[in-house]
Image (cartoon, rainbow, N blue to C red):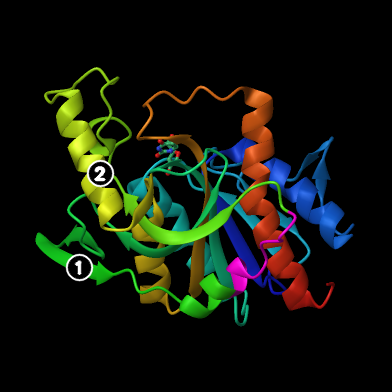
Amino acid sequence: MFGDVKFVCFGGQPSRMEAFCGLVARELNINDHEMDGDKHKNYASGTDRYALHKVGPVLSVSHGIGIPSLSVVFNEIVKLVYYAGCKDVVFFRIGTCGGIGLEPGTVVLTQKAVDGEMNPEYTMSILGKKVRRPAVIDNSIVSELNACANEDDDFQTVRGTTLCADDFYEGQARLDGAFCDYEEEDKMKYLSDLREHGVCNIEMESLGFLAMCHHAGVKGAVACVTLLDRLKGDFVSCDIKMLKRWQERPQNIVIRYIKKKLGII
Ligand code: R2B
Ligand code: URA
């Protein structure tokens, strides 16, 4: 069933990854996918944990929020492509993030992923011991993705460092969570320091995703759209229609990459 898979696209929400399938089917002009009513078939519906869809050589998978949620489905997808005998598969995370000093709606391609203390390694506890896995970036994919940005796109695509936080609120220096034991001034100093160190955006999975890709020997890259400029606020206030259009931006960059690889453009 899955032996022809060449591209696995991960993203947070099940509904976004179902909608992504529609875009892939239209753009690649593929009609071989199974439907369930008017929705793309969810091959993982039995577990009710995540969505798993397939359109031709593209798998579309939801990973939930944060590395712990991602790592479960990531393990299961690595096993799937291994047992299916897939060759030269590329993994993408296509997501959303907060930008630092960027126009909201900008696409950021992760050139380096770091944790909240700027370490470029994903640290986890295995058998009671800390294990560090480096998030080694495949620069060739980042460059190829960057080359998929068009001059006449109505948004910017940039490359930069992504801070991968363990939390949406305090872990991302927000002031609007239930807990906050610092002041606006501390937040602004932290965000300005991050910017000076080349951090362009903040999200919650890139470090684990890239470290696991490297550890699995799979090529991978992360493309996220910024929903707000964190130097100007904490609250994601863009309306739902705009959000949907913006979410398609990194999806389109990845689809252009896939089309190039398949020789469609
Ligand atoms: C971006 O958005 C989610 C938090 O709202 C998280 O999954 C992420 O990385
Ligand atoms: N996702 C995040 O993790 N942070 C943001 O600010 C926006 C989306």
The picture places residue 81, in percent across and down from the top left corner, at: 57, 71
Q: Residue at x 61, y 52 (%)?
A: 250
Q: Is residue 75 left or right of residue 38?
A: left
Q: Which residues are magenta?
A: 144-152
Q: Is residue 252 above or below residue 242?
A: below
- The quadrant in which residue 190 appears is top left
SS category of the residue bearing label 1: strand
- Per the image, the residue denoted by label 1 is 132
| Mark earlier in primary sequence (1, 2) | 1
SS category of the residue bearing label 2: helix
Q: Is residue 265 left or right of residue 45?
A: right
Mark 1 or 2: in front is 2
Q: As shown in the figure, which amino acid type bears the numbered disc 2? A: Ser
Q: Is residue 174 above or below residue 133?
A: above
Q: Residue at x 35, y 50 (%)?
A: 67
The picture places residue 4, in percent across and down from the top left corner, at: 72, 74
Ligand 1 shows up in which quadrant of the image? top left
Count neighbours of disc 1 (C-alpha within 10 A) and say few if under 14, some if 14 to 19, many if 20 or more.
Answer: some
Asked whether the viewer can see residue 231, the reply is yes
Q: Is residue 105 left or right of residue 245?
A: left
Q: As shown in the figure, which amino acid type bears the numbered disc 1? A: Arg
Q: Nearer the viewer, residue 51 or 132?
A: 132
Ligand 2 within 8 Å of the CB at mark 2? no
Q: Nearer the viewer, residue 262 or 240?
A: 240
- Per the image, the residue denoted by label 2 is 192
- For the N terminus, give its image quadrant: bottom right
The picture places residue 115, in percent across and down from the top left corner, at: 25, 54
- For the C terminus, give its image quadrant: bottom right
